[in-house]
Amino acid sequence: MTTGDRPGVLSRSLAWIDALPGHGWWIYPLLFVALFGWAHGVLWSTGEVPFGSTLQTVAVSLFYPPYTLAATALINRSASRALDAFWPATGWADEERSAWRYRFVHSPAGFGLAAFGIGVVVAAIAFLSASEQAFGGGGDRLAVFIAYFPVASLGYAVVMLAFVHTAHQLRLVARIHREATAIDPFDRTSVYAFSSMTALTGLAYAASGYFTLLFNGAYQAGNVVATVVVVTVFALAIVCFILPLWGVHDRLVDEKQVLAREVEVRLSRLTEEMYRRIELGDFEGTKAVGDSLVGVSAIRKRISDIPTWPWRPQVLSGFLSALLVPVAVYVLTRAISGLGP
């Protein structure tokens, strides 16, 4: 993909939003308000719910389109910062950076119609397979469908486009780690550069999954399509964080082994030199060799301490906490509610 290629519809939309005042962050809540106006305007005008009231399943579905767009825009910014931090490790000319930045923030075209079609089909199947209680326990099912279906279709379509965008970005992370020519295990700034981006990507997916479980549980109950989507989202959260960084982990292991072999060769030579001087009775000369042994031993310790996983410990612990603590809280609250009368 070159800078002359036409980006996908999601990338074009985000670029248009970013060009607005304040980088267009006000567009996302405005989109939520517009979707809310459509959905509940239908429900109120048909008398399906009293004016001023909401239907929870419909109200929750309004969250996904603006959230997915905003999260993707935030991840794009993180990807751009990560690229700048990693660039010294590429060994490439600085003129190439703009082309890589373009690739990271623009997903390829050709998926828009397919995503829209999938969104329509999945929204229809999810609606038809949901229980009546999920949409208010009866009433005018057609009115609920008209209120819910366009919003849900848009949400599923945007999520599908986000999946494509995420896959495109994470392939680029793996590729740049694979093709970089100047990776230095001691340069932790470059080595850790993309871990924040992949962690943010994973947490963005996990957050949407938790939101669904907490606020849309009735819709998920017995709904095979919606349940599959949520499970897929949580699996993606883990994959997004770990898989793109696996390649650089392997490279760091290899680089560390090379450094370890080199330092062991030097230690062996110094040890032989120390024995030689002792046997010759050159005890004054052993001091210089001894100092060298101490220095090289310190280098060996430093090499031994080089981590080969490309993330800071606090990033890993933060990601795992954000991923697992809500699961524990959710399971605990469900267990407690099950013990009630």
Image (cartoon, rainbow, N blue to C red):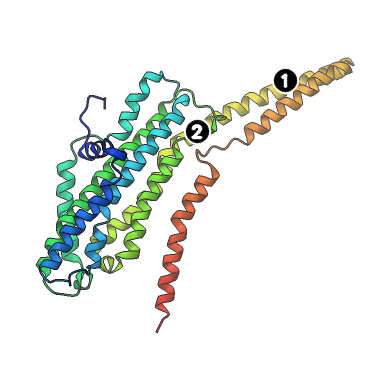
Q: Label 1 is placed on what type of residue?
A: Arg
Horizontal and vertical percent position of residue 227: 28, 61
Closer-to-camera residue (196/170): 196
Mark 1 surroundings within 10 Å by alpha-carbon count, few (fewer than 14), some (14 through 19), many (20 or more): few
Q: Is residue 248 left or right of residue 75?
A: right
Instruction: Say left or right for 60 vs 194.
Output: left
88 shown above or below 167: above
Q: Residue at x 12, y 69 (%)?
A: 141
Give the answer, above or below, for where 142 lies relative to 154.
below
What is the secondary structure assignment of the residue under circle 2? helix
- Picture disc at residue 269: 1
Horizontal arrangement in the rendering, residue 312 relative to residue 287 (left or right): left
The quarter of the rendered structure image containing the N terminus is: top left
Residue 191 got which mark? 2
Direction bottom: furthest residue: 341
Image disc number at residue 302: none
Q: Name the amino acid, label 2.
A: Val
In this rendering, the answer to whether 119 lies above or below 176 is below
Q: Position of residue 14 (x, y in %)?
A: 26, 39
